[in-house]
Image: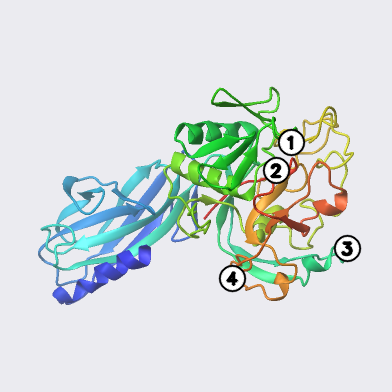
Protein backbone atom coordinates (compact mmCIF):
# COMPACT_ATOMS: atom_id res chain seq x y z
CA UNK A 1 0.00 0.00 0.00
CA UNK A 2 2.83 2.39 0.87
CA UNK A 3 4.48 1.88 -2.53
CA UNK A 4 1.21 2.53 -4.34
CA UNK A 5 0.61 5.63 -2.26
CA UNK A 6 4.04 7.09 -3.06
CA UNK A 7 3.76 6.10 -6.73
CA UNK A 8 0.46 8.02 -7.01
CA UNK A 9 2.11 11.07 -5.53
CA UNK A 10 5.13 10.85 -7.80
CA UNK A 11 2.92 10.75 -10.90
CA UNK A 12 1.77 14.25 -10.04
CA UNK A 13 5.21 15.78 -9.57
CA UNK A 14 5.89 16.80 -13.20
CA UNK A 15 2.98 19.29 -13.12
CA UNK A 16 5.34 22.05 -11.90
CA UNK A 17 9.11 22.27 -11.87
CA UNK A 18 11.04 23.21 -8.75
CA UNK A 19 14.19 25.21 -8.60
CA UNK A 20 15.35 23.30 -5.58
CA UNK A 21 13.37 20.52 -3.91
CA UNK A 22 12.85 20.87 -0.17
CA UNK A 23 14.11 18.08 2.05
CA UNK A 24 12.19 16.48 4.88
CA UNK A 25 13.12 14.09 7.67
CA UNK A 26 10.41 12.37 9.75
CA UNK A 27 10.98 10.26 12.83
CA UNK A 28 8.83 8.25 15.20
CA UNK A 29 10.05 8.29 18.81
CA UNK A 30 13.42 9.46 17.51
CA UNK A 31 13.91 6.55 15.09
CA UNK A 32 13.78 6.22 11.31
CA UNK A 33 12.84 2.52 11.08
CA UNK A 34 11.91 -0.63 13.05
CA UNK A 35 9.97 1.50 15.52
CA UNK A 36 8.03 -0.43 18.15
CA UNK A 37 5.75 1.39 20.57
CA UNK A 38 4.39 -0.35 23.63
CA UNK A 39 0.61 -0.46 24.16
CA UNK A 40 -0.68 2.85 25.53
CA UNK A 41 2.67 4.64 25.18
CA UNK A 42 3.04 7.94 23.36
CA UNK A 43 3.78 7.98 19.65
CA UNK A 44 5.91 11.05 18.93
CA UNK A 45 6.10 12.14 15.30
CA UNK A 46 8.82 14.77 14.71
CA UNK A 47 9.71 16.26 11.37
CA UNK A 48 12.29 18.66 9.96
CA UNK A 49 11.79 20.68 6.76
CA UNK A 50 14.57 22.40 4.86
CA UNK A 51 12.73 24.76 2.55
CA UNK A 52 15.04 24.94 -0.45
CA UNK A 53 13.92 27.44 -3.07
CA UNK A 54 11.25 27.83 -5.71
CA UNK A 55 8.30 27.50 -3.30
CA UNK A 56 7.58 31.10 -2.38
CA UNK A 57 3.86 30.57 -2.62
CA UNK A 58 1.61 29.21 0.11
CA UNK A 59 1.85 25.51 0.90
CA UNK A 60 0.04 22.92 2.97
CA UNK A 61 2.13 20.47 4.97
CA UNK A 62 0.26 17.28 5.80
CA UNK A 63 1.37 14.74 8.40
CA UNK A 64 -0.58 11.56 7.68
CA UNK A 65 -0.68 8.22 9.46
CA UNK A 66 -1.62 5.38 7.14
CA UNK A 67 -2.91 2.03 8.38
CA UNK A 68 -3.61 -0.95 6.10
CA UNK A 69 -7.24 0.21 5.85
CA UNK A 70 -7.39 3.94 6.52
CA UNK A 71 -5.60 7.26 6.93
CA UNK A 72 -5.49 9.63 9.87
CA UNK A 73 -3.86 12.97 10.58
CA UNK A 74 -2.80 14.35 13.94
CA UNK A 75 -1.90 17.97 13.37
CA UNK A 76 -2.36 21.43 14.78
CA UNK A 77 -4.15 23.61 12.22
CA UNK A 78 -7.70 22.35 11.84
CA UNK A 79 -9.91 20.43 9.43
CA UNK A 80 -9.45 21.29 5.74
CA UNK A 81 -11.18 18.61 3.67
CA UNK A 82 -11.74 14.91 3.15
CA UNK A 83 -10.30 12.82 0.36
CA UNK A 84 -11.21 9.26 -0.57
CA UNK A 85 -11.30 8.03 3.01
CA UNK A 86 -10.43 9.62 6.31
CA UNK A 87 -10.47 13.29 7.29
CA UNK A 88 -7.32 15.36 6.83
CA UNK A 89 -5.98 18.31 8.74
CA UNK A 90 -3.24 20.58 7.42
CA UNK A 91 -0.40 20.78 9.89
CA UNK A 92 0.70 24.11 8.46
CA UNK A 93 -0.50 26.54 5.78
CA UNK A 94 1.75 29.40 4.70
CA UNK A 95 5.03 30.12 2.95
CA UNK A 96 7.38 27.17 3.09
CA UNK A 97 10.19 27.78 5.55
CA UNK A 98 12.75 25.80 7.51
CA UNK A 99 11.09 24.23 10.52
CA UNK A 100 11.46 21.62 13.25
CA UNK A 101 8.23 20.53 14.85
CA UNK A 102 6.25 17.75 16.50
CA UNK A 103 3.02 16.77 14.78
CA UNK A 104 1.92 14.14 17.31
CA UNK A 105 2.89 13.18 20.84
CA UNK A 106 0.14 10.95 22.19
CA UNK A 107 -1.01 7.31 22.15
CA UNK A 108 -2.62 5.92 19.00
CA UNK A 109 -4.69 2.74 18.64
CA UNK A 110 -2.71 -0.50 18.51
CA UNK A 111 -1.74 -1.47 14.98
CA UNK A 112 0.76 -0.87 12.20
CA UNK A 113 1.24 2.56 10.60
CA UNK A 114 3.23 4.52 8.07
CA UNK A 115 3.73 8.22 8.91
CA UNK A 116 4.19 10.54 5.89
CA UNK A 117 5.13 14.16 5.36
CA UNK A 118 3.25 15.40 2.28
CA UNK A 119 3.50 18.92 0.83
CA UNK A 120 0.89 20.56 -1.40
CA UNK A 121 2.65 23.50 -3.02
CA UNK A 122 -0.57 25.26 -4.03
CA UNK A 123 -2.70 24.90 -0.89
CA UNK A 124 -5.93 24.47 -2.84
CA UNK A 125 -6.85 20.91 -1.98
CA UNK A 126 -5.18 17.58 -1.30
CA UNK A 127 -4.40 15.65 -4.51
CA UNK A 128 -5.59 18.64 -6.57
CA UNK A 129 -3.54 17.73 -9.67
CA UNK A 130 -0.99 20.42 -8.83
CA UNK A 131 2.39 19.79 -7.24
CA UNK A 132 2.03 17.19 -4.50
CA UNK A 133 4.83 15.03 -3.24
CA UNK A 134 6.09 13.18 -0.22
CA UNK A 135 9.65 13.49 0.96
CA UNK A 136 9.93 11.03 3.83
CA UNK A 137 8.04 8.29 5.66
CA UNK A 138 8.58 6.05 8.67
CA UNK A 139 6.95 2.74 9.57
CA UNK A 140 5.98 1.98 13.14
CA UNK A 141 3.80 -0.41 15.06
CA UNK A 142 2.02 0.03 18.37
CA UNK A 143 1.72 -3.12 20.39
CA UNK A 144 -1.32 -5.27 20.80
CA UNK A 145 -1.85 -6.29 24.40
CA UNK A 146 -0.76 -9.86 25.00
CA UNK A 147 1.66 -9.97 22.07
CA UNK A 148 5.47 -9.74 22.08
CA UNK A 149 7.65 -8.20 19.39
CA UNK A 150 10.02 -10.52 17.52
CA UNK A 151 12.70 -8.47 15.74
CA UNK A 152 13.77 -9.13 12.19
CA UNK A 153 16.86 -11.24 11.64
CA UNK A 154 18.49 -14.43 10.49
CA UNK A 155 18.69 -17.70 12.38
CA UNK A 156 19.60 -21.30 11.58
CA UNK A 157 16.48 -23.42 11.50
CA UNK A 158 16.50 -27.15 12.23
CA UNK A 159 18.08 -29.79 14.51
CA UNK A 160 21.49 -28.58 15.73
CA UNK A 161 22.07 -31.57 18.01
CA UNK A 162 21.66 -34.62 15.79
CA UNK A 163 18.88 -36.09 17.94
CA UNK A 164 15.85 -35.39 15.75
CA UNK A 165 14.28 -36.95 12.67
CA UNK A 166 15.38 -36.46 9.04
CA UNK A 167 12.46 -34.04 8.56
CA UNK A 168 14.33 -31.57 10.81
CA UNK A 169 17.30 -31.42 8.42
CA UNK A 170 19.24 -29.87 6.86
CA UNK A 171 19.92 -27.02 9.24
CA UNK A 172 19.48 -23.96 7.05
CA UNK A 173 19.62 -20.19 7.45
CA UNK A 174 16.43 -18.21 7.04
CA UNK A 175 15.68 -14.51 7.40
CA UNK A 176 12.44 -13.48 9.07
CA UNK A 177 10.94 -9.99 8.96
CA UNK A 178 9.85 -8.47 12.27
CA UNK A 179 6.51 -9.66 13.61
CA UNK A 180 4.50 -10.02 16.81
CA UNK A 181 3.54 -13.25 18.54
CA UNK A 182 0.98 -14.08 21.21
CA UNK A 183 2.69 -14.37 24.59
CA UNK A 184 0.33 -17.24 25.46
CA UNK A 185 -1.65 -19.84 23.57
CA UNK A 186 -5.26 -18.84 22.92
CA UNK A 187 -7.32 -19.89 25.93
CA UNK A 188 -10.62 -21.73 26.20
CA UNK A 189 -12.35 -18.55 27.36
CA UNK A 190 -11.07 -16.45 24.46
CA UNK A 191 -12.13 -19.10 21.96
CA UNK A 192 -15.49 -19.44 23.69
CA UNK A 193 -16.00 -15.69 23.28
CA UNK A 194 -15.36 -16.11 19.55
CA UNK A 195 -17.79 -19.03 19.29
CA UNK A 196 -20.60 -17.07 20.94
CA UNK A 197 -19.96 -14.08 18.70
CA UNK A 198 -19.77 -16.16 15.51
CA UNK A 199 -22.86 -18.18 16.43
CA UNK A 200 -24.81 -15.00 17.02
CA UNK A 201 -23.80 -13.78 13.56
CA UNK A 202 -24.81 -17.06 11.90
CA UNK A 203 -21.23 -17.81 10.85
CA UNK A 204 -21.04 -21.24 12.51
CA UNK A 205 -23.36 -24.11 13.36
CA UNK A 206 -23.18 -27.06 15.75
CA UNK A 207 -23.90 -30.55 14.42
CA UNK A 208 -23.62 -33.54 16.76
CA UNK A 209 -21.46 -31.50 19.12
CA UNK A 210 -18.98 -30.36 16.44
CA UNK A 211 -18.69 -26.74 15.38
CA UNK A 212 -18.65 -26.19 11.62
CA UNK A 213 -18.43 -23.22 9.33
CA UNK A 214 -22.10 -22.54 8.57
CA UNK A 215 -23.33 -24.51 5.57
CA UNK A 216 -19.94 -26.10 4.95
CA UNK A 217 -17.98 -29.19 5.88
CA UNK A 218 -14.91 -27.67 7.57
CA UNK A 219 -14.90 -28.58 11.26
CA UNK A 220 -13.73 -25.78 13.54
CA UNK A 221 -13.79 -27.33 17.00
CA UNK A 222 -15.45 -29.95 19.15
CA UNK A 223 -17.62 -29.47 22.21
CA UNK A 224 -17.60 -31.79 25.19
CA UNK A 225 -20.57 -33.77 23.94
CA UNK A 226 -18.57 -34.84 20.88
CA UNK A 227 -15.11 -35.13 22.46
CA UNK A 228 -14.45 -35.55 26.18
CA UNK A 229 -11.11 -33.79 25.71
CA UNK A 230 -12.90 -30.53 24.93
CA UNK A 231 -13.45 -27.93 27.63
CA UNK A 232 -16.17 -26.17 25.60
CA UNK A 233 -19.87 -26.87 26.19
CA UNK A 234 -22.88 -25.90 24.09
CA UNK A 235 -26.43 -25.66 25.38
CA UNK A 236 -29.49 -23.67 24.30
CA UNK A 237 -27.49 -21.67 21.79
CA UNK A 238 -24.73 -20.65 24.22
CA UNK A 239 -21.12 -21.81 24.49
CA UNK A 240 -19.43 -22.02 27.90
CA UNK A 241 -16.18 -23.31 29.42
CA UNK A 242 -15.70 -26.06 31.99
CA UNK A 243 -15.32 -24.31 35.35
CA UNK A 244 -11.66 -23.90 36.27
CA UNK A 245 -10.43 -24.39 32.70
CA UNK A 246 -11.02 -20.85 31.42
CA UNK A 247 -7.29 -20.00 31.35
CA UNK A 248 -6.16 -23.34 29.97
CA UNK A 249 -5.21 -23.47 26.27
CA UNK A 250 -7.98 -24.14 23.79
CA UNK A 251 -7.86 -27.71 22.46
CA UNK A 252 -9.89 -29.84 20.05
CA UNK A 253 -9.56 -26.97 17.59
CA UNK A 254 -8.74 -27.58 13.93
CA UNK A 255 -6.46 -25.54 11.68
CA UNK A 256 -9.61 -24.13 10.09
CA UNK A 257 -10.98 -23.18 13.50
CA UNK A 258 -7.74 -21.40 14.39
CA UNK A 259 -7.82 -19.47 11.12
CA UNK A 260 -11.47 -18.44 11.61
CA UNK A 261 -10.62 -17.21 15.11
CA UNK A 262 -7.73 -15.16 13.68
CA UNK A 263 -10.08 -13.34 11.31
CA UNK A 264 -12.60 -12.72 14.10
CA UNK A 265 -9.93 -11.41 16.46
CA UNK A 266 -8.57 -9.12 13.73
CA UNK A 267 -12.04 -7.66 13.23
CA UNK A 268 -12.45 -7.20 17.00
CA UNK A 269 -9.24 -5.15 17.02
CA UNK A 270 -10.25 -3.27 13.85
CA UNK A 271 -7.36 -4.78 11.94
CA UNK A 272 -7.65 -6.12 8.39
CA UNK A 273 -8.39 -9.83 8.10
CA UNK A 274 -5.72 -12.04 6.58
CA UNK A 275 -7.69 -15.09 5.46
CA UNK A 276 -10.19 -15.78 2.74
CA UNK A 277 -12.46 -18.33 4.43
CA UNK A 278 -13.65 -19.62 1.06
CA UNK A 279 -10.19 -20.52 -0.26
CA UNK A 280 -8.30 -20.54 3.08
CA UNK A 281 -5.55 -18.50 1.48
CA UNK A 282 -3.63 -16.05 3.65
CA UNK A 283 -2.70 -12.53 2.54
CA UNK A 284 0.61 -11.89 4.26
CA UNK A 285 1.61 -8.33 5.07
CA UNK A 286 -1.93 -7.01 5.53
CA UNK A 287 -1.37 -6.08 9.17
CA UNK A 288 -3.90 -8.56 10.52
CA UNK A 289 -3.67 -11.58 12.81
CA UNK A 290 -2.84 -14.99 11.41
CA UNK A 291 -1.14 -18.25 12.30
CA UNK A 292 2.65 -17.98 12.41
CA UNK A 293 4.65 -19.65 9.70
CA UNK A 294 6.72 -22.60 10.83
CA UNK A 295 9.90 -20.53 10.49
CA UNK A 296 8.41 -17.66 12.50
CA UNK A 297 7.30 -20.10 15.15
CA UNK A 298 10.77 -21.60 15.54
CA UNK A 299 12.48 -18.21 15.60
CA UNK A 300 10.06 -17.08 18.31
CA UNK A 301 10.48 -20.32 20.29
CA UNK A 302 14.26 -19.99 20.39
CA UNK A 303 13.98 -16.56 22.03
CA UNK A 304 17.06 -15.23 20.22
CA UNK A 305 19.32 -17.92 21.69
CA UNK A 306 21.77 -18.58 18.83
CA UNK A 307 25.21 -18.87 20.40
CA UNK A 308 24.88 -21.72 21.05
CA UNK A 309 21.60 -23.06 19.64
CA UNK A 310 19.75 -24.94 22.38
CA UNK A 311 17.41 -27.93 22.26
CA UNK A 312 14.84 -26.04 24.34
CA UNK A 313 14.19 -22.31 24.61
CA UNK A 314 16.31 -22.09 27.77
CA UNK A 315 19.07 -24.73 27.30
CA UNK A 316 19.71 -28.42 26.70
CA UNK A 317 18.07 -29.95 29.78
CA UNK A 318 14.48 -30.18 30.90
CA UNK A 319 12.53 -31.06 34.04
CA UNK A 320 9.01 -30.68 35.36
CA UNK A 321 9.64 -27.18 36.69
CA UNK A 322 10.22 -25.86 33.15
CA UNK A 323 7.43 -27.24 30.96
CA UNK A 324 4.35 -29.48 30.89
CA UNK A 325 4.97 -32.86 29.30
CA UNK A 326 4.11 -36.50 30.00
CA UNK A 327 4.69 -37.21 33.72
CA UNK A 328 6.21 -33.78 34.31
CA UNK A 329 4.70 -33.83 37.81
CA UNK A 330 2.50 -30.73 37.76
CA UNK A 331 -0.66 -30.80 39.95
CA UNK A 332 -2.95 -30.83 36.89
CA UNK A 333 -2.13 -34.46 36.03
CA UNK A 334 -5.41 -35.64 37.51
CA UNK A 335 -8.87 -36.32 36.17
CA UNK A 336 -9.64 -36.93 32.52
CA UNK A 337 -7.04 -35.81 29.95
CA UNK A 338 -5.79 -33.61 28.46
CA UNK A 339 -3.71 -32.60 31.48
CA UNK A 340 -3.02 -29.06 30.40
CA UNK A 341 -1.73 -26.36 32.71
CA UNK A 342 -3.05 -22.78 32.59
CA UNK A 343 -1.24 -20.63 30.04
CA UNK A 344 1.78 -18.95 31.62
CA UNK A 345 1.76 -21.42 34.51
CA UNK A 346 5.58 -21.63 34.44
CA UNK A 347 6.09 -18.07 35.67
CA UNK A 348 8.17 -18.90 38.75
CA UNK A 349 5.26 -19.44 41.12
CA UNK A 350 4.17 -22.86 39.89
CA UNK A 351 4.15 -26.17 41.75
CA UNK A 352 6.74 -27.65 41.83
CA UNK A 353 8.48 -24.27 42.14
CA UNK A 354 10.86 -23.12 39.45
CA UNK A 355 12.19 -20.17 37.53
CA UNK A 356 10.11 -17.84 35.39
CA UNK A 357 10.25 -19.69 32.06
CA UNK A 358 9.43 -16.82 29.71
CA UNK A 359 11.92 -17.10 26.86
CA UNK A 360 14.14 -14.33 25.52
CA UNK A 361 11.20 -12.71 23.73
CA UNK A 362 8.88 -12.94 26.74
CA UNK A 363 6.86 -15.89 25.39
CA UNK A 364 5.50 -18.68 27.60
CA UNK A 365 4.89 -22.38 26.91
CA UNK A 366 6.80 -22.41 23.63
CA UNK A 367 7.35 -26.10 24.25
CA UNK A 368 4.88 -28.49 25.86
CA UNK A 369 1.30 -28.10 27.12
CA UNK A 370 -0.34 -28.19 23.63
CA UNK A 371 0.89 -28.42 20.07
CA UNK A 372 0.61 -25.20 18.06
CA UNK A 373 -0.88 -25.12 14.57
CA UNK A 374 1.28 -23.23 12.04
CA UNK A 375 0.30 -21.75 8.70
CA UNK A 376 2.44 -24.03 6.51
CA UNK A 377 1.59 -27.09 4.53
CA UNK A 378 3.85 -29.92 5.70
CA UNK A 379 6.56 -31.61 3.62
CA UNK A 380 9.14 -33.87 5.26
CA UNK A 381 11.79 -32.77 2.72
CA UNK A 382 10.92 -29.06 2.55
CA UNK A 383 13.99 -27.94 4.50
CA UNK A 384 16.21 -28.99 1.60
CA UNK A 385 14.68 -26.38 -0.69
CA UNK A 386 13.35 -23.78 1.74
CA UNK A 387 13.82 -20.20 0.54
CA UNK A 388 15.98 -17.88 2.63
CA UNK A 389 13.56 -14.96 2.96
CA UNK A 390 10.41 -15.52 5.04
CA UNK A 391 9.60 -19.09 4.00
CA UNK A 392 5.88 -19.90 4.02
CA UNK A 393 6.16 -23.64 3.41
CA UNK A 394 5.21 -25.68 0.34
CA UNK A 395 2.59 -24.35 -2.06
CA UNK A 396 0.23 -27.23 -1.29
CA UNK A 397 -0.07 -30.41 0.71
CA UNK A 398 -2.29 -32.70 2.73
CA UNK A 399 -1.24 -31.85 6.30
CA UNK A 400 -0.54 -28.61 8.15
CA UNK A 401 2.48 -28.20 10.43
CA UNK A 402 2.25 -28.60 14.21
CA UNK A 403 5.06 -27.62 16.58
CA UNK A 404 6.25 -27.91 20.23
CA UNK A 405 4.85 -31.09 21.76
CA UNK A 406 2.12 -31.33 24.39
CA UNK A 407 1.29 -32.29 27.97
CA UNK A 408 1.24 -35.94 26.89
CA UNK A 409 4.41 -35.90 24.76
CA UNK A 410 7.78 -37.27 25.69
CA UNK A 411 10.57 -34.76 26.08
CA UNK A 412 12.06 -35.44 22.64
CA UNK A 413 8.96 -33.86 21.07
CA UNK A 414 9.44 -30.64 23.05
CA UNK A 415 12.64 -29.53 21.29
CA UNK A 416 12.60 -26.21 19.40
CA UNK A 417 13.36 -28.10 16.17
CA UNK A 418 10.71 -30.80 16.61
CA UNK A 419 7.98 -30.84 13.99
CA UNK A 420 4.95 -32.94 13.12
CA UNK A 421 1.70 -32.46 11.18
CA UNK A 422 -1.92 -33.43 10.71
CA UNK A 423 -4.80 -32.79 8.35
CA UNK A 424 -6.26 -29.30 8.85
CA UNK A 425 -9.72 -30.54 9.88
CA UNK A 426 -8.34 -32.81 12.62
CA UNK A 427 -9.69 -32.24 16.14
CA UNK A 428 -7.46 -33.37 18.98
CA UNK A 429 -7.31 -32.66 22.70
CA UNK A 430 -3.60 -31.85 22.41
CA UNK A 431 -3.75 -29.30 19.58
CA UNK A 432 -4.00 -25.55 20.19
CA UNK A 433 -2.61 -22.38 18.65
CA UNK A 434 -1.34 -18.86 19.09
CA UNK A 435 -1.40 -15.96 16.64
CA UNK A 436 1.13 -13.74 14.90
CA UNK A 437 0.89 -10.20 13.52
CA UNK A 438 3.13 -8.74 10.82
Residue under the point 54% across and 26% down: 237
How much space separates mark 2 and mark 1, taking CA atoms? 8 Å
Q: Is residue 317 visible?
A: no
Q: Under tag 3, what secondary structure?
A: loop
In the shown orientation, is residue 144 left or right of residue 364? left
Seen in the image, is 379 located left or right of residue 263? right
* Mark 1 vs 4: CB contact within 8 A: no
Inspect this view and state whether residue 194 appears: yes
Q: Label 2, on which residue?
A: 364
Observer-nearest of 378 and 114: 378
Q: Which label lies toward us, 2 or 1?
A: 2
The residue that label 1 is drawn on is: 347
How far across and how far down the image is residue 71, in percent?
31, 51
Cα–Cα gap, marks 2 and 3: 24 Å
- Residue 370 circle label: none
Q: Position of residue 342 (x, y in %)?
A: 72, 33
Chain-order first, disc 2 or disc 3: 3
Q: Is residue 248 above or below residue 290?
A: above
Q: Which mark is residue 163?
A: 3
Helix, strand or loop at mark 4 = loop
Mark 3 and mark 1: Cα distance apart in space:
28 Å
Q: Residue at x 69, y 30 (%)?
A: 225
Q: Which numbered mark, 2 or 3, is in the foreground of this view? A: 3
Q: Position of residue 322 (x, y in %)?
A: 82, 42
Q: Which residue is mark 4?
A: 389
Q: Are marks 2 and 1 in contact (CB under 8 Å)?
A: yes
Amino acid sequence: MRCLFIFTILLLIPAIGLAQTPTVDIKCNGLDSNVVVNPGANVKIDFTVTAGSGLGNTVDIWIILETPTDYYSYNGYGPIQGWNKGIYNAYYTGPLADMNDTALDSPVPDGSYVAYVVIDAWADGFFDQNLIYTLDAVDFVTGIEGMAFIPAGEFEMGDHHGVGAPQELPVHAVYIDAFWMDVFDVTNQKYCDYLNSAYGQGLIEVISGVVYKFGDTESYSATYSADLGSRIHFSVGVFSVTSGKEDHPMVTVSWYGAVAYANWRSAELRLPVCYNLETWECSFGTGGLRLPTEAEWEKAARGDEQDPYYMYPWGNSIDGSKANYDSSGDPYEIGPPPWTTPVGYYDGGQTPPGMDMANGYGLYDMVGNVYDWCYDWYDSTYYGSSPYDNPHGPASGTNRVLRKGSCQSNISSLRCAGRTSHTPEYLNGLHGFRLALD
